[in-house]
Image (spheres, helix red, strand yellow):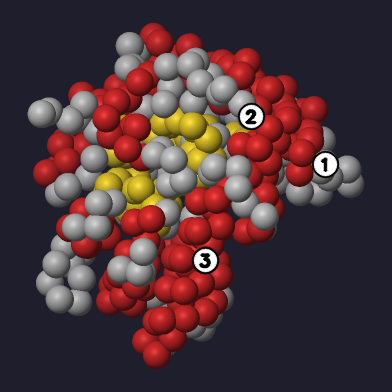
Amino acid sequence: MTETLADIAQALVLDGKGILAADESTGTIKKRFDSIATESTDSSRRDYRELLFRAPDIDKYISGVILYDETLRQTAADGTPLAKVLQDQGIIPGIKVDLGAKALAGHPGETITEGLDGLRDRLNEYASLGAKFTKWRGVYHITDESPSFAAIHANAHALARYAALAQEAGMVPIVEPEILMDGEHDINVCQAVSEEVLRSVFAELANQEVELEGILLKPNMVISGQDCPDQNSIDEVAERTLDTLKRCVPAAVPGIVFLSGGQSDELATAHLDAMNKLGHNLPWKLSFSYGRALQAAPLLAWGGKSENATAMQAAFIKRAEDNSKAATGTYA
C-alpha cells in the first residue's frame, strides 16, 4: 500500500507521541556545546545525537526527529546511517530545509526566511536519504512597529511555496510561523498578532493548493513577552492559545505540534498538558516539536563525556515521557 502524505502526518501525531527537534545548525549546536565546555566537531555532534536517537524506549514517546543536513548524512559509530537508526525503531526521519531568517529589505529589524531557490532539488535528495517530512520556520518580531504587513505576508508566501514543494517531493511539510517571545508585549498583543499571522499563512497555503491533510502546524503558544511584567497563568495561556487555534486553523490539519519558544522545560510541558486537559473534541491533535525543552536536561547530564551516556539518555527519556503525558493531558 502506498503511504500517503496524510498517513505520514497522522503517524507523527499518534496519541502520546511528539517530535524531537534535533535540527540545530552547526553554529547553534556550538553554542549549546560551549555551555558544557565541549568542543563542537563532526564526531562530537554525531556522538551526542546518536545517544539521543538510541535512548532506550525512545519510540514510546517520539514519533519523528527533525534532522540537520549534516546529521541526515552522518553514520553512527557502527556505520549505520543515523536516519536508519531512527527508522529501525519505527521513528520517522525529517529534515530542516530552510536556510535561515535574513534581513527583510526595507523593514529594519524584520526578517524573511530564505531557501526557496534550489529547494526542489534539495528535497528530492533528502527524500532519497530517507527523510519523510520537512520543516521551514518563519520568524516574526513584536515591537511597536512590527510585524509589518510586508513581513507577515512575505513569510506566509514563503511557507506556502515551501509546503507545496515538499508535498510535490512526497514529504509532509511542518509549517512553522514563530512569533518570538522577545519583548514587553502582553498576551493580548501576542494573541492578535498570532491570529493575523495564522490567517495569512492558511490563506497562502490555500493559494498554493497545499493539501492540508498532509501538513502539520508548528506555532508558538499565545503568551506574554518575556519582559512583560504581567505573566499569565498556565490555564490562561492554554485558553488563549486554544481560542486562537479554533479561530484560525482548519479542521483538515491533522496535528499542531508546538514549539517551546524560549519557555522553560517545565512550563512548555505544563502549557501543553493544560491545553489537552481543557480542549475537548478538538479537530486536530495537540502535541510537541521541542528542541531545547527536550534537550537541555540531557545535554547538561552528558557534559561531553562518554561515561555519562546512561545518565544523559535517562534525562532525555524523562523529558520525552513528561511531554508524552502532556500530549494526552495526563501530566502531573
The answer to whether the residue labelled 3 contacts the one labelled 2, judged by CB atoms less than 8 Å apart, is: no
Q: Which mark is residue 279?
A: 2
Residue 217 position, x and y percent, is: 47, 31
Instruction: Give the CA separation, mark 3 to mark 2.
Output: 25 Å
* Residue 312 seen in render: yes
Q: Amino acid at mark 2?
A: Gly
Residue 318's disc number: 3
SS type, badge 1: loop
29 left or right of 70?
right
Dot 2 surroundings within 10 Å: few (below 14), some, or many (20 or more)?
A: some
Q: Amino acid at mark 3?
A: Lys
| Secondary element at image label 2 | loop
Between 281 and 143, the one nearer to me in the picture:
281
Instruction: Mark 3 and mark 1 in contact? Answer it, CB < 8 Å.
Output: no
Of mark 3 and mark 2, the one earlier in the sequence is 2
Q: Residue at x 21, y 26 (%)?
A: 4
Above or below residue 245? Residue 277 is below
Q: Quadrant of the C terminus?
A: bottom right
Gap in angstroms between the C-alphas marked 2 and 1: 18 Å
The residue wearing badge 1 is 232
For marks 3 and 1, give the one nearer the viewer. Answer: 3
Which quadrant would residue 167 be assigned to in this image?
Answer: top left
- What amino acid type should be assigned to the residue bearing mark 1? Asn
Q: Residues within 10 Å of mark 1 (few under 14, many from 20)?
A: some
Q: Residue at x 57, y 22 (%)?
A: 281
Q: Residues within 10 Å of mark 3 (few under 14, many from 20)?
A: some
Q: Position of residue 179 (x, y in %)?
A: 62, 36
**Left or right placement of residue 103 versus residue 169 in this view:** right
